[in-house]
Protein backbone atom coordinates (compact mmCIF):
# COMPACT_ATOMS: atom_id res chain seq x y z
CA UNK A 1 0.00 0.00 0.00
CA UNK A 2 1.56 3.26 -1.10
CA UNK A 3 2.14 6.11 1.35
CA UNK A 4 2.50 9.28 -0.69
CA UNK A 5 2.30 13.05 -0.58
CA UNK A 6 -1.00 13.92 -2.25
CA UNK A 7 0.57 15.93 -5.08
CA UNK A 8 2.88 13.02 -5.98
CA UNK A 9 0.05 10.82 -7.24
CA UNK A 10 -2.56 11.41 -9.89
CA UNK A 11 -6.30 10.92 -9.53
CA UNK A 12 -8.19 9.76 -12.60
CA UNK A 13 -10.34 12.70 -13.81
CA UNK A 14 -14.07 12.79 -13.29
CA UNK A 15 -16.81 14.60 -11.42
CA UNK A 16 -15.61 15.98 -8.08
CA UNK A 17 -17.96 16.12 -5.11
CA UNK A 18 -16.91 17.34 -1.66
CA UNK A 19 -18.65 15.97 1.43
CA UNK A 20 -18.55 18.13 4.57
CA UNK A 21 -19.85 16.89 7.94
CA UNK A 22 -22.07 19.19 9.99
CA UNK A 23 -24.37 19.07 13.01
CA UNK A 24 -27.58 21.07 13.17
CA UNK A 25 -27.13 23.84 15.71
CA UNK A 26 -23.34 23.70 15.53
CA UNK A 27 -21.13 23.04 18.55
CA UNK A 28 -23.71 24.75 20.75
CA UNK A 29 -25.82 21.61 20.53
CA UNK A 30 -22.98 19.32 21.64
CA UNK A 31 -22.54 17.93 25.16
CA UNK A 32 -19.70 18.78 27.51
CA UNK A 33 -17.41 15.78 27.85
CA UNK A 34 -15.20 15.35 30.92
CA UNK A 35 -12.81 12.89 29.28
CA UNK A 36 -9.25 14.19 29.17
CA UNK A 37 -7.27 15.05 26.04
CA UNK A 38 -4.07 13.24 25.11
CA UNK A 39 -0.72 15.01 25.36
CA UNK A 40 -0.29 14.66 21.59
CA UNK A 41 -3.63 16.32 20.89
CA UNK A 42 -3.15 19.14 23.40
CA UNK A 43 0.32 20.04 22.12
CA UNK A 44 -0.96 19.97 18.54
CA UNK A 45 -3.84 22.30 19.41
CA UNK A 46 -1.66 24.74 21.34
CA UNK A 47 0.91 24.86 18.53
CA UNK A 48 -1.88 25.66 16.07
CA UNK A 49 -3.26 28.32 18.42
CA UNK A 50 0.17 29.94 18.86
CA UNK A 51 0.57 29.92 15.08
CA UNK A 52 -2.80 31.66 14.71
CA UNK A 53 -1.80 34.36 17.20
CA UNK A 54 1.56 34.86 15.51
CA UNK A 55 0.40 34.94 11.88
CA UNK A 56 -3.38 35.52 12.06
CA UNK A 57 -3.73 32.41 9.92
CA UNK A 58 -5.04 28.98 10.76
CA UNK A 59 -2.26 26.69 11.92
CA UNK A 60 -1.76 22.96 11.71
CA UNK A 61 -3.15 22.63 8.20
CA UNK A 62 0.00 21.00 6.86
CA UNK A 63 -0.30 18.03 9.22
CA UNK A 64 -3.13 15.97 7.82
CA UNK A 65 -3.20 12.33 6.79
CA UNK A 66 -5.63 10.83 4.34
CA UNK A 67 -6.75 7.97 2.20
CA UNK A 68 -7.71 7.29 -1.40
CA UNK A 69 -9.73 4.17 -2.27
CA UNK A 70 -10.53 3.01 -5.81
CA UNK A 71 -13.88 1.35 -6.56
CA UNK A 72 -14.40 -0.49 -9.86
CA UNK A 73 -18.11 0.35 -10.10
CA UNK A 74 -20.25 3.46 -10.64
CA UNK A 75 -20.72 5.77 -7.67
CA UNK A 76 -24.00 5.38 -5.79
CA UNK A 77 -24.78 8.64 -4.01
CA UNK A 78 -27.15 7.03 -1.45
CA UNK A 79 -24.65 4.25 -0.72
CA UNK A 80 -21.67 6.56 -0.25
CA UNK A 81 -23.68 8.86 2.00
CA UNK A 82 -24.74 5.88 4.13
CA UNK A 83 -21.14 4.62 4.20
CA UNK A 84 -19.65 7.87 5.42
CA UNK A 85 -22.33 8.47 8.06
CA UNK A 86 -21.97 4.93 9.41
CA UNK A 87 -18.20 5.39 9.58
CA UNK A 88 -18.55 8.68 11.47
CA UNK A 89 -20.93 6.99 13.90
CA UNK A 90 -18.50 4.08 14.28
CA UNK A 91 -15.51 6.24 15.29
CA UNK A 92 -16.21 8.61 18.17
CA UNK A 93 -13.09 10.68 17.48
CA UNK A 94 -14.92 12.06 14.42
CA UNK A 95 -17.76 13.25 16.69
CA UNK A 96 -15.64 14.90 19.37
CA UNK A 97 -13.84 18.24 19.48
CA UNK A 98 -11.51 19.94 21.96
CA UNK A 99 -11.59 23.70 22.55
CA UNK A 100 -8.86 25.77 24.20
CA UNK A 101 -10.30 27.78 27.09
CA UNK A 102 -7.55 29.88 28.65
CA UNK A 103 -5.04 27.53 30.26
CA UNK A 104 -7.47 24.63 30.08
CA UNK A 105 -9.22 22.47 27.53
CA UNK A 106 -12.88 21.62 27.05
CA UNK A 107 -13.99 18.54 25.14
CA UNK A 108 -17.37 18.51 23.41
CA UNK A 109 -18.96 15.41 21.91
CA UNK A 110 -22.09 14.55 19.97
CA UNK A 111 -24.05 11.32 19.80
CA UNK A 112 -24.13 8.83 16.90
CA UNK A 113 -26.72 9.82 14.32
CA UNK A 114 -26.36 13.57 14.86
CA UNK A 115 -23.70 14.24 12.20
CA UNK A 116 -25.01 14.91 8.68
CA UNK A 117 -23.22 15.46 5.37
CA UNK A 118 -23.41 18.43 3.04
CA UNK A 119 -22.79 17.46 -0.58
CA UNK A 120 -21.06 20.04 -2.76
CA UNK A 121 -20.71 19.42 -6.49
CA UNK A 122 -17.45 21.12 -7.52
CA UNK A 123 -17.35 20.23 -11.21
CA UNK A 124 -16.07 17.90 -13.90
CA UNK A 125 -12.33 17.63 -14.45
CA UNK A 126 -10.71 16.33 -17.62
CA UNK A 127 -7.12 16.50 -16.34
CA UNK A 128 -5.59 15.04 -13.21
CA UNK A 129 -3.34 17.99 -12.33
CA UNK A 130 -6.03 20.62 -11.65
CA UNK A 131 -8.18 17.96 -9.96
CA UNK A 132 -5.42 17.02 -7.49
CA UNK A 133 -4.69 20.68 -6.79
CA UNK A 134 -8.36 21.32 -5.99
CA UNK A 135 -8.55 18.31 -3.67
CA UNK A 136 -5.25 19.12 -1.95
CA UNK A 137 -6.28 22.72 -1.38
CA UNK A 138 -9.66 21.69 0.00
CA UNK A 139 -8.03 19.20 2.36
CA UNK A 140 -5.56 21.86 3.57
CA UNK A 141 -8.40 24.25 4.35
CA UNK A 142 -10.71 21.68 5.93
CA UNK A 143 -8.29 20.04 8.36
CA UNK A 144 -7.32 22.96 10.62
CA UNK A 145 -7.33 21.39 14.12
CA UNK A 146 -8.91 24.34 15.95
CA UNK A 147 -12.19 23.82 14.06
CA UNK A 148 -14.74 21.04 13.78
CA UNK A 149 -14.83 19.20 11.54
CA UNK A 150 -11.08 18.87 11.06
CA UNK A 151 -11.74 16.32 8.33
CA UNK A 152 -13.61 15.96 5.07
CA UNK A 153 -14.38 13.53 2.25
CA UNK A 154 -14.38 13.80 -1.52
CA UNK A 155 -15.48 11.55 -4.36
CA UNK A 156 -14.44 11.58 -8.00
CA UNK A 157 -17.06 9.79 -10.06
CA UNK A 158 -16.68 8.31 -13.53
CA UNK A 159 -18.90 6.18 -15.74
CA UNK A 160 -17.66 2.82 -14.46
CA UNK A 161 -15.60 3.67 -11.38
CA UNK A 162 -15.01 6.21 -8.63
CA UNK A 163 -12.41 7.28 -6.08
CA UNK A 164 -13.21 7.98 -2.44
CA UNK A 165 -10.82 10.36 -0.68
CA UNK A 166 -10.58 11.34 2.98
CA UNK A 167 -8.30 13.66 4.95
CA UNK A 168 -8.13 14.42 8.67
CA UNK A 169 -5.91 16.37 10.98
CA UNK A 170 -3.21 14.21 12.56
CA UNK A 171 -4.84 14.62 15.98
CA UNK A 172 -7.66 12.37 14.72
CA UNK A 173 -5.76 9.64 12.86
CA UNK A 174 -2.39 7.98 12.42
CA UNK A 175 -0.99 5.93 9.56
CA UNK A 176 -2.09 2.60 11.01
CA UNK A 177 -5.64 3.93 11.40
CA UNK A 178 -5.79 4.52 7.67
CA UNK A 179 -4.24 1.16 6.77
CA UNK A 180 -7.19 -0.40 8.60
CA UNK A 181 -9.77 2.17 7.46
CA UNK A 182 -9.53 1.33 3.77
CA UNK A 183 -11.00 -2.11 4.47
CA UNK A 184 -13.71 -0.68 6.73
CA UNK A 185 -14.86 1.85 4.18
CA UNK A 186 -14.88 -0.69 1.35
CA UNK A 187 -16.87 -3.11 3.53
CA UNK A 188 -19.37 -0.43 4.55
CA UNK A 189 -19.90 0.63 0.94
CA UNK A 190 -20.47 -2.92 -0.30
CA UNK A 191 -23.01 -3.48 2.48
CA UNK A 192 -24.77 -0.19 1.72
CA UNK A 193 -25.02 -1.07 -1.96
CA UNK A 194 -26.60 -4.42 -1.06
CA UNK A 195 -28.70 -2.89 1.73
CA UNK A 196 -27.15 -5.35 4.19
CA UNK A 197 -25.62 -5.00 7.63
CA UNK A 198 -21.82 -4.65 7.40
CA UNK A 199 -19.75 -7.44 8.92
CA UNK A 200 -17.38 -5.42 11.09
CA UNK A 201 -16.35 -6.13 14.66
CA UNK A 202 -17.07 -3.52 17.35
CA UNK A 203 -14.36 -0.90 17.78
CA UNK A 204 -13.10 1.11 20.73
CA UNK A 205 -12.94 4.90 21.06
CA UNK A 206 -9.77 6.95 20.87
CA UNK A 207 -11.50 9.45 23.15
CA UNK A 208 -11.57 6.75 25.85
CA UNK A 209 -7.95 5.86 25.16
CA UNK A 210 -6.87 9.51 25.38
CA UNK A 211 -8.45 9.91 28.80
CA UNK A 212 -6.89 6.68 30.04
CA UNK A 213 -3.43 7.56 28.73
CA UNK A 214 -3.60 11.13 30.07
CA UNK A 215 -4.56 10.04 33.58
CA UNK A 216 -1.72 7.54 33.68
CA UNK A 217 0.85 9.97 32.31
CA UNK A 218 -0.11 12.86 34.58
CA UNK A 219 0.22 10.62 37.64
CA UNK A 220 3.73 9.57 36.65
CA UNK A 221 6.88 11.26 37.91
CA UNK A 222 10.53 11.48 36.98
CA UNK A 223 11.28 7.97 38.24
CA UNK A 224 9.48 6.35 35.30
CA UNK A 225 11.80 4.22 33.09
CA UNK A 226 10.82 6.30 30.04
CA UNK A 227 12.26 9.41 31.68
CA UNK A 228 15.58 7.69 32.37
CA UNK A 229 15.73 6.31 28.83
CA UNK A 230 15.15 9.72 27.25
CA UNK A 231 17.48 11.47 29.69
CA UNK A 232 20.37 9.24 28.60
CA UNK A 233 19.52 9.68 24.92
CA UNK A 234 19.26 13.47 25.06
CA UNK A 235 22.39 13.78 27.17
CA UNK A 236 24.33 11.83 24.54
CA UNK A 237 23.10 14.37 21.98
CA UNK A 238 24.18 17.36 24.07
CA UNK A 239 20.58 17.98 25.07
CA UNK A 240 19.06 17.83 21.58
CA UNK A 241 17.38 15.43 19.20
CA UNK A 242 19.48 13.81 16.46
CA UNK A 243 19.24 15.37 13.01
CA UNK A 244 19.85 13.73 9.66
CA UNK A 245 23.48 14.77 9.30
CA UNK A 246 26.96 13.71 10.41
CA UNK A 247 27.98 14.75 13.92
CA UNK A 248 30.65 17.04 12.58
CA UNK A 249 28.08 18.80 10.41
CA UNK A 250 25.50 18.96 13.20
CA UNK A 251 27.97 20.77 15.41
CA UNK A 252 28.05 23.64 12.92
CA UNK A 253 24.26 24.07 12.98
CA UNK A 254 22.83 26.11 15.81
CA UNK A 255 20.51 23.97 17.95
CA UNK A 256 17.95 26.79 18.08
CA UNK A 257 17.93 26.84 14.27
CA UNK A 258 17.43 23.07 14.11
CA UNK A 259 14.45 23.26 16.45
CA UNK A 260 12.89 26.39 14.96
CA UNK A 261 9.24 26.06 13.85
CA UNK A 262 8.29 25.62 10.23
CA UNK A 263 7.76 28.88 8.30
CA UNK A 264 4.36 30.23 7.35
CA UNK A 265 3.43 28.51 4.05
CA UNK A 266 2.10 31.85 2.77
CA UNK A 267 5.56 33.39 3.13
CA UNK A 268 7.19 33.67 -0.30
CA UNK A 269 10.46 32.39 1.18
CA UNK A 270 8.83 29.21 2.51
CA UNK A 271 9.87 26.11 0.58
CA UNK A 272 7.92 22.87 0.79
CA UNK A 273 9.75 19.69 1.61
CA UNK A 274 10.58 17.19 -1.10
CA UNK A 275 9.39 13.62 -1.05
CA UNK A 276 10.10 10.29 -2.63
CA UNK A 277 8.37 6.92 -2.53
CA UNK A 278 8.53 3.56 -4.21
CA UNK A 279 8.97 -0.20 -4.05
CA UNK A 280 12.57 -1.11 -3.14
CA UNK A 281 12.15 -4.91 -2.85
CA UNK A 282 9.56 -7.18 -4.42
CA UNK A 283 7.99 -9.89 -2.27
CA UNK A 284 10.58 -12.56 -3.06
CA UNK A 285 13.50 -10.22 -2.41
CA UNK A 286 11.89 -9.02 0.83
CA UNK A 287 11.49 -12.63 1.95
CA UNK A 288 15.17 -13.28 1.26
CA UNK A 289 16.19 -10.25 3.29
CA UNK A 290 13.86 -11.34 6.11
CA UNK A 291 15.54 -14.75 6.12
CA UNK A 292 18.94 -13.08 6.47
CA UNK A 293 17.63 -11.12 9.47
CA UNK A 294 16.29 -14.33 11.02
CA UNK A 295 19.58 -16.13 10.46
CA UNK A 296 21.26 -13.26 12.31
CA UNK A 297 18.88 -13.77 15.24
CA UNK A 298 16.69 -10.74 14.65
CA UNK A 299 13.36 -9.59 13.30
CA UNK A 300 12.79 -7.72 10.07
CA UNK A 301 12.50 -4.52 12.11
CA UNK A 302 15.93 -5.10 13.64
CA UNK A 303 17.36 -5.87 10.21
CA UNK A 304 15.97 -2.68 8.68
CA UNK A 305 17.44 -0.56 11.48
CA UNK A 306 20.75 -2.40 11.32
CA UNK A 307 20.95 -1.67 7.59
CA UNK A 308 20.07 1.99 8.24
CA UNK A 309 22.89 2.21 10.78
CA UNK A 310 25.46 0.57 8.51
CA UNK A 311 24.63 2.88 5.62
CA UNK A 312 24.86 5.88 7.93
CA UNK A 313 28.28 4.78 9.20
CA UNK A 314 29.51 4.11 5.67
CA UNK A 315 28.41 7.53 4.46
CA UNK A 316 29.43 9.63 7.47
CA UNK A 317 32.00 7.74 9.51
CA UNK A 318 29.97 8.43 12.67
CA UNK A 319 30.53 6.09 15.60
CA UNK A 320 26.83 6.01 16.45
CA UNK A 321 23.58 5.90 14.54
CA UNK A 322 20.81 7.82 16.33
CA UNK A 323 17.19 8.38 15.37
CA UNK A 324 13.67 8.37 16.83
CA UNK A 325 11.22 5.50 16.29
CA UNK A 326 7.42 5.72 16.41
CA UNK A 327 5.90 2.95 18.54
CA UNK A 328 2.18 2.24 18.45
CA UNK A 329 0.21 2.29 21.69
CA UNK A 330 -2.61 -0.05 20.62
CA UNK A 331 -2.11 -2.32 23.62
CA UNK A 332 -5.66 -3.64 23.76
CA UNK A 333 -7.77 -5.42 21.14
CA UNK A 334 -10.44 -2.71 21.25
CA UNK A 335 -7.96 -0.14 19.90
CA UNK A 336 -6.71 -2.22 16.95
CA UNK A 337 -9.06 -0.79 14.32
CA UNK A 338 -9.94 2.49 16.06
CA UNK A 339 -9.24 5.81 14.38
CA UNK A 340 -6.90 7.93 16.47
CA UNK A 341 -3.35 9.07 17.16
CA UNK A 342 -2.09 5.92 18.90
CA UNK A 343 1.60 6.78 18.65
CA UNK A 344 4.43 7.19 21.13
CA UNK A 345 8.10 7.58 20.26
CA UNK A 346 11.25 5.87 21.49
CA UNK A 347 14.93 6.76 21.07
CA UNK A 348 17.24 4.45 19.14
CA UNK A 349 21.04 4.35 19.27
CA UNK A 350 23.32 1.82 17.59
CA UNK A 351 27.07 1.62 18.15
CA UNK A 352 28.84 1.22 14.80
CA UNK A 353 32.27 2.46 15.91
CA UNK A 354 33.90 -0.90 15.10
CA UNK A 355 32.31 -1.16 11.61
CA UNK A 356 30.24 -4.23 12.56
CA UNK A 357 29.07 -6.90 10.19
CA UNK A 358 25.38 -7.03 9.38
CA UNK A 359 24.87 -9.95 11.77
CA UNK A 360 26.56 -8.01 14.57
CA UNK A 361 24.49 -4.93 13.80
CA UNK A 362 21.28 -7.00 13.91
CA UNK A 363 22.22 -8.40 17.32
CA UNK A 364 22.83 -4.89 18.63
CA UNK A 365 19.64 -3.54 17.06
CA UNK A 366 17.62 -6.34 18.67
CA UNK A 367 19.03 -5.50 22.10
CA UNK A 368 18.51 -1.76 21.58
CA UNK A 369 14.89 -2.20 20.47
CA UNK A 370 14.20 -4.13 23.66
CA UNK A 371 16.01 -1.60 25.86
CA UNK A 372 14.75 1.60 24.27
CA UNK A 373 11.10 0.60 24.00
CA UNK A 374 10.83 1.79 27.60
CA UNK A 375 11.06 5.28 26.13
CA UNK A 376 7.61 4.83 24.59
CA UNK A 377 6.10 3.95 27.97
CA UNK A 378 5.09 7.58 28.44
CA UNK A 379 3.95 10.17 25.89
CA UNK A 380 7.10 12.06 24.93
CA UNK A 381 5.43 15.37 25.68
CA UNK A 382 4.98 14.27 29.29
CA UNK A 383 8.64 13.21 29.38
CA UNK A 384 9.66 16.57 27.91
CA UNK A 385 7.54 18.33 30.53
CA UNK A 386 9.31 16.45 33.32
CA UNK A 387 12.74 17.13 31.82
CA UNK A 388 12.12 20.72 30.76
CA UNK A 389 12.93 19.78 27.16
CA UNK A 390 11.40 21.76 24.28
CA UNK A 391 12.72 20.10 21.12
CA UNK A 392 10.82 17.73 18.85
CA UNK A 393 12.06 14.75 16.80
CA UNK A 394 14.03 15.75 13.70
CA UNK A 395 15.09 12.37 12.25
CA UNK A 396 12.39 9.70 12.41
CA UNK A 397 12.34 6.20 10.92
CA UNK A 398 9.08 4.24 10.97
CA UNK A 399 8.68 0.57 10.11
CA UNK A 400 5.27 -1.12 9.76
CA UNK A 401 4.38 -4.59 8.49
CA UNK A 402 0.97 -4.20 6.84
CA UNK A 403 0.62 -7.72 5.41
CA UNK A 404 -1.84 -8.89 8.04
CA UNK A 405 -4.22 -5.94 7.87
CA UNK A 406 -7.66 -6.78 6.39
CA UNK A 407 -7.69 -6.18 2.65
CA UNK A 408 -3.92 -5.62 2.57
CA UNK A 409 -3.31 -7.51 -0.67
CA UNK A 410 -6.01 -5.63 -2.57
CA UNK A 411 -4.84 -2.28 -1.19
CA UNK A 412 -1.22 -2.98 -2.10
CA UNK A 413 -2.28 -3.99 -5.60
CA UNK A 414 -3.65 -0.48 -6.12
CA UNK A 415 -7.08 -0.36 -4.49
CA UNK A 416 -5.99 2.11 -1.82
CA UNK A 417 -3.17 4.41 -0.80
CA UNK A 418 -2.43 6.46 2.31
CA UNK A 419 -1.99 10.17 1.62
CA UNK A 420 -0.17 12.88 3.54
CA UNK A 421 -0.01 16.64 3.30
CA UNK A 422 3.05 18.59 2.26
CA UNK A 423 5.33 19.98 4.97
CA UNK A 424 7.50 23.08 5.31
CA UNK A 425 9.68 21.87 8.20
CA UNK A 426 13.21 23.17 7.47
CA UNK A 427 15.19 20.36 9.13
CA UNK A 428 12.92 17.35 9.64
CA UNK A 429 13.62 14.07 7.85
CA UNK A 430 10.94 11.37 8.09
CA UNK A 431 11.44 7.95 6.51
CA UNK A 432 8.67 5.33 6.40
CA UNK A 433 9.59 1.75 5.48
CA UNK A 434 6.66 -0.64 5.10
CA UNK A 435 6.59 -4.38 4.48
CA UNK A 436 3.52 -4.96 2.32
CA UNK A 437 2.15 -8.00 0.47
CA UNK A 438 4.02 -6.83 -2.64
CA UNK A 439 7.41 -6.33 -1.00
CA UNK A 440 9.08 -3.47 0.83
CA UNK A 441 8.05 0.13 0.20
CA UNK A 442 9.77 3.34 1.21
CA UNK A 443 8.42 6.88 1.55
CA UNK A 444 10.25 9.95 2.80
CA UNK A 445 9.95 13.69 3.24
CA UNK A 446 12.96 15.93 3.68
CA UNK A 447 14.25 19.48 3.10
CA UNK A 448 14.87 20.41 -0.57
CA UNK A 449 18.04 18.96 -2.02
CA UNK A 450 19.51 18.31 -5.48
CA UNK A 451 17.63 15.71 -7.47
CA UNK A 452 19.00 12.24 -7.98
CA UNK A 453 20.68 11.65 -11.33
CA UNK A 454 19.46 8.65 -13.34
CA UNK A 455 22.57 6.54 -12.64
CA UNK A 456 22.12 6.97 -8.88
CA UNK A 457 18.48 5.95 -9.12
CA UNK A 458 19.29 2.59 -10.65
CA UNK A 459 18.96 -0.13 -8.00
CA UNK A 460 18.03 -3.38 -9.76
CA UNK A 461 14.47 -4.38 -8.92
CA UNK A 462 13.61 -1.06 -7.26
CA UNK A 463 10.99 1.37 -8.54
CA UNK A 464 11.42 4.66 -6.66
CA UNK A 465 9.90 8.01 -7.59
CA UNK A 466 12.61 10.57 -6.90
CA UNK A 467 12.08 14.35 -6.91
CA UNK A 468 12.65 16.01 -10.25
CA UNK A 469 15.29 18.72 -10.65
CA UNK A 470 12.56 21.33 -11.01
CA UNK A 471 11.51 20.63 -7.42
CA UNK A 472 14.60 22.44 -6.17
CA UNK A 473 14.41 26.23 -6.66
CA UNK A 474 17.18 27.46 -8.93
CA UNK A 475 18.43 23.97 -9.78
CA UNK A 476 18.43 23.26 -13.52
CA UNK A 477 20.43 20.03 -13.79
CA UNK A 478 20.64 16.69 -12.03
CA UNK A 479 23.78 17.76 -10.16
CA UNK A 480 25.08 15.81 -7.18
CA UNK A 481 22.50 13.62 -5.49
CA UNK A 482 21.14 14.97 -2.21
CA UNK A 483 21.99 13.25 1.09
CA UNK A 484 18.59 11.73 1.84
CA UNK A 485 18.18 10.36 -1.67
CA UNK A 486 21.72 8.96 -1.59
CA UNK A 487 21.11 7.44 1.82
CA UNK A 488 17.95 5.65 0.71
CA UNK A 489 19.58 4.56 -2.54
CA UNK A 490 22.40 2.92 -0.58
CA UNK A 491 19.94 1.41 1.90
CA UNK A 492 17.94 -0.20 -0.92
CA UNK A 493 21.11 -1.52 -2.52
CA UNK A 494 22.42 -2.97 0.76
CA UNK A 495 19.29 -4.88 1.73
CA UNK A 496 18.97 -6.26 -1.80
CA UNK A 497 22.60 -7.39 -1.84
CA UNK A 498 22.23 -9.02 1.57
CA UNK A 499 19.17 -10.94 0.43
CA UNK A 500 20.69 -11.93 -2.90
CA UNK A 501 23.81 -13.27 -1.15
CA UNK A 502 21.73 -15.48 1.13
CA UNK A 503 21.62 -19.23 0.61
CA UNK A 504 17.92 -19.11 1.53
CA UNK A 505 15.84 -18.88 -1.63
CA UNK A 506 12.10 -18.24 -1.79
CA UNK A 507 11.72 -18.56 -5.54
CA UNK A 508 12.80 -22.16 -6.00
Image (cartoon, grey):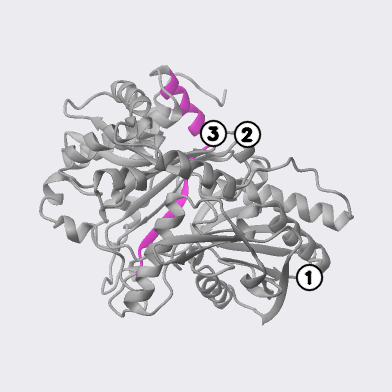
Q: Determine the CA span between mark 3 and mark 2.
A: 7 Å
Please give the name of the residue rendered at 66% of the width and 52% of the height, measured from the top-left corner.
91
| Residue 196 x, y percent position in the rendering | 88, 51
Which residue position holds label 1?
A: 159
Q: Which circle's residue, 1 or 2, is located before the other in the chain?
A: 1
| Residue 432 x, y percent position in the rendering | 43, 46
**Visible residue check, residue 280:** no
**Visible residue check, residue 198:** yes
Quadrant containing the C terminus is top right
Q: Is residue 131 magenta?
A: no
User: Residue 469 versus residue 79: which sits nearer the camera?
Assistant: 79
Numbered label attached to residue 89: none
Residue ranking furthest to the right: 195
231 is higher (above) or lower (below) than 97 = above
66 is higher (above) or lower (below) than 402 = below
Which residue position holds label 2?
A: 333
Q: Residues within 10 Å of mark 3 (few under 14, many from 20)?
A: few
| Residue 131 x, y percent position in the rendering | 59, 75
Q: Quadrant of residue 376?
A: top left
Q: Are marks 1 and 3 in contact (CB under 8 Å)?
A: no
Magenta range is 272-294
Q: Residues within 10 Å of mark 2 (few under 14, many from 20)?
A: few
Q: Residues within 10 Å of mark 1 (few under 14, many from 20)?
A: few
The secondary structure type at the circle numbered 2 is: helix
Q: Determine the CA span between mark 1 and mark 3.
A: 44 Å
Which residue position holds label 3?
A: 331
Amino acid sequence: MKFVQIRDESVEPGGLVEWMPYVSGGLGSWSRDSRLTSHNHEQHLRSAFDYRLRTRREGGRESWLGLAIEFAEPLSIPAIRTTLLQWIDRHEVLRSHVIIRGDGLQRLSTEPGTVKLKMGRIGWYTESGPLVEQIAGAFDRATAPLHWPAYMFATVGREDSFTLLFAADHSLVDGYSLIMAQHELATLYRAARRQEQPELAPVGSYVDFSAQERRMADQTGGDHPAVRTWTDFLRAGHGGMPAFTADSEAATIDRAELESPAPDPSDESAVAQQSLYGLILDDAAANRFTAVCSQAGGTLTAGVLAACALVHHDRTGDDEFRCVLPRHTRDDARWLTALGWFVAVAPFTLDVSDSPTFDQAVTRATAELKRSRQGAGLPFLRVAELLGHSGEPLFVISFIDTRYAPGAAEADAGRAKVLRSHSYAPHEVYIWINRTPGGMRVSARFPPEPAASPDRQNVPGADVNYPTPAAVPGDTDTGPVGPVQAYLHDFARLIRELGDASTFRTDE
